[in-house]
Every structure is written in structure tokens, then in C-alpha cells.
């Protein structure tokens, strides 16, 4: 087997999965070199510095997409969701999907130990973000991070720590590829110190639920709960 030809072919597949083609292939190669391999081979370049850069770039990109996609998340929910998306486990899952374990070059000591551990795969994934930024700049990097964001958002709920019905409805809509829910006050009555609101929630211009409550927030929660029940009924019918 011609290893060099195989490796070039795998790098081509990797770039296709990323949705980004490197102008400087040496950056991609460096992102896949672990320091243990570089030390054994006497190489000067490996992926640790790119990993440092990619870590910061990923946090920025994920923060941006969470801010845009989940306008109802408060700072705490955004922080929890970001932590789940940039953790080593999430990076390793994405790296495995890209095929990084078979492409990452490690030293003999690591190969004899347990090969490409999830932590090494996660580090290589971060280095890959750094390499994209160095090669293409901010906007291509954001496109790759968007791919990463969508990879995880289609596999598990984002911001799972959020328990209020508005956040749950936001996540349910996102998982179905629908736009953000919009809440509209239908009517308001009662005394100023205890107003009674009726609220409608629409998703993509279509009414998803209605609710009433003493206060705008309570009415919006009731509307979200009604919409979630409607979502559940639709999902049951689809099955």
C-alpha cells in the first residue's frame, strides 16, 4: 500500500467534510502532527500552537452562533450551552466524524499505549480550527465552526440545562430546522398591579400555541407549554 497516496486521498476527504479547501496544505499537515511524533522525527512543527489558537477561535464562533440562534437564553444558559459544545467530548466526537484518529500522526510511545485517545482527537480538532483561521481568516473559519455547531445541534439538545418552557420550545424548533418562536400579546386586562395577559406564539408565521397568565412572562410560558404539547402530538402522529 502506498501510504503517501492514501494519506493525500484522506486529506482530500477531510477537506470535503470540512467544506473548506486549504490554500496552504502545510497548515493542514501541521494540524495533524502531535508533538510526540515531531520529537521522534526531529521536526520543528506540530499542532500545539494551532490548538491554542483554535481553542480561542472555537469559543468565539460557538458564542456567536448561540447568541444568534437562541435569543431567549440568558447569560447562564448561553455559558452552559457553550461549555457543552466546546468540551473535549464534543470535540472528540466531531474529530472522529471527520476521520482524525486515523490521520493524526503520533509518536511510537503513544501508539503503543492506546493510539489516538479521545483527548488527542479533541486537541487535533482544535488545531484544525486554528489551521483554517491561519489559512483563510475569520469568515471561512466561521463557516467551518457553523458546520461544527450544526453537527452537534442535530444530535443532541443544545442548552440542556435550561428547563423553562420558552427555552424548551426554542430548542424544539431549532431541532426541526424552524425559526425562533415569536411571542405576541393578544390582549391585556385587569388592574395595573395584577394584569392578565393573553399571548400567542408563532413559529415561521404559523400559530404554534396560546396561553394566559398573570403577567407577560407567565402568559408566554403558558403559550410555550401549549406549543410544546402541539409539537409532541405532531411528533407522535409522524411516528
Image (cartoon, grey):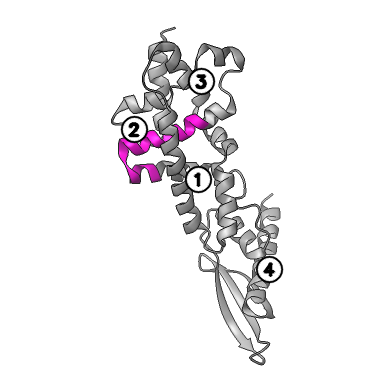
Q: Secondary structure at mark 1?
A: helix
Q: Single out the residue that lies furthest toward the top.
A: 1
The stretch of residues the image draws in magenta is 123-142
Q: Residue at x 61, y 56 (%)?
A: 172
Q: Nearer the viewer, residue 36 or 212?
A: 36
Residue picked out by circle 3: 102
SS of the residue under disc 2: loop
Question: Residue beneath label 4, please?
Answer: 226
Badge 1 crowding class, 10 Å Cα cut-off, few under 14, some 14 to 19, many 20 or more, is: many
Label 4: how many Cα within 10 Å (few below 14, some 14–19, many 20+): many
Q: Nearer the viewer, mark 4 or mark 1?
A: 1
Helix, strand or loop for the magenta stretch, by majority: helix
Residue 53 screen position, x and y as percent: 41, 38
For marks 1 and 2 on the same chain, the one whose residue lies earlier in the sequence: 2
- Residue 7's place in the image compared with 125, above or below, is above
The alpha-carbon separation of the residues under discs 3 and 1 comes to: 23 Å
Task: Estimate how packed mark 3 is, as few (under 14), some (14 to 19) or many (20 or more) residues with alpha carbons within 10 Å.
Answer: some
In the image, what residue occupies the spot 58% across and 24% down? 117
Q: Can the viewer see residue 138? A: yes
State the separation of the CA atoms marked 3 and 4. 48 Å
Label annotation for residue 149: 1
| 22 sits left or right of 235 in the view | left
Q: CA distance from mark 2 to mark 4?
A: 46 Å
In the displayed orientation, state which residue is furthest to the left: 23
Q: How many marks?
A: 4
Q: Is residue 206 left or right of residue 64?
A: right
Q: For the residues carrying marks 3 and 4, which lies nearer the camera in this image? A: 3
In the rendered image of this protein, does residue 201 appear above or below residue 34? below
The reply to whether the magenta stretch includes residue 134 is: yes
* Secondary element type, mark 4: helix
Nearer the N terminus, badge 3 or badge 4? 3
Determine which residue is flagged by label 2: 21
Amino acid at each position: 500500500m502506498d501510504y503517501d497516496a492514501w494519506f493525500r486521498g484522506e486529506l482530500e476527504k477531510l477537506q470535503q467534510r470540512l467544506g473548506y479547501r486549504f490554500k496552504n496544505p502545510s497548515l493542514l499537515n501541521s494540524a495533524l502532527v502531535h508533538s510526540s511524533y515531531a520529537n521522534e522525527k526531529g521536526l520543528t512543527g506540530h499542532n500545539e500552537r494551532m490548538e491554542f489558537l483554535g481553542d480561542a477561535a472555537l469559543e468565539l464562533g460557538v458564542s456567536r452562533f448561540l447568541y444568534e440562534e437562541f435569543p431567549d437564553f440568558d447569560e447562564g444558559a448561553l455559558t452552559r450551552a457553550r461549555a457543552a459544545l466546546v468540551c473535549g467530548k464534543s470535540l472528540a466526537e466531531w474529530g472522529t466524524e471527520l476521520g482524525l484518529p486515523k490521520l493524526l500522526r503520533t509518536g511510537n510511545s503513544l501508539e503503543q499505549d492506546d493510539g489516538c485517545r479521545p483527548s488527542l482527537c479533541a486537541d487535533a480538532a482544535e488545531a484544525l480550527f486554528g489551521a483554517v483561521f491561519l489559512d483563510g481568516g475569520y469568515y471561512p473559519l466561521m463557516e467551518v465552526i457553523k458546520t461544527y455547531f450544526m453537527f452537534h445541534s442535530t444530535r443532541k439538545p443544545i442548552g440542556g440545562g435550561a428547563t423553562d418552557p420558552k427555552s424548551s420550545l426554542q430548542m424544539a424548533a431549532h431541532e426541526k430546522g424552524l425559526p425562533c418562536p415569536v411571542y405576541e400579546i393578544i390582549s391585556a386586562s385587569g388592574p395595573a398591579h395584577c394584569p392578565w395577559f393573553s399571548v400567542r406564539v408563532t413559529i415561521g408565521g404559523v400559530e404554534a400555541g396560546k396561553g394566559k397568565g398573570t403577567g407577560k412572562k407567565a402568559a408566554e410560558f403558558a403559550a410555550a407549554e401549549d406549543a410544546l404539547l402541539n409539537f409532541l402530538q405532531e411528533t407522535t402522529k409522524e411516528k
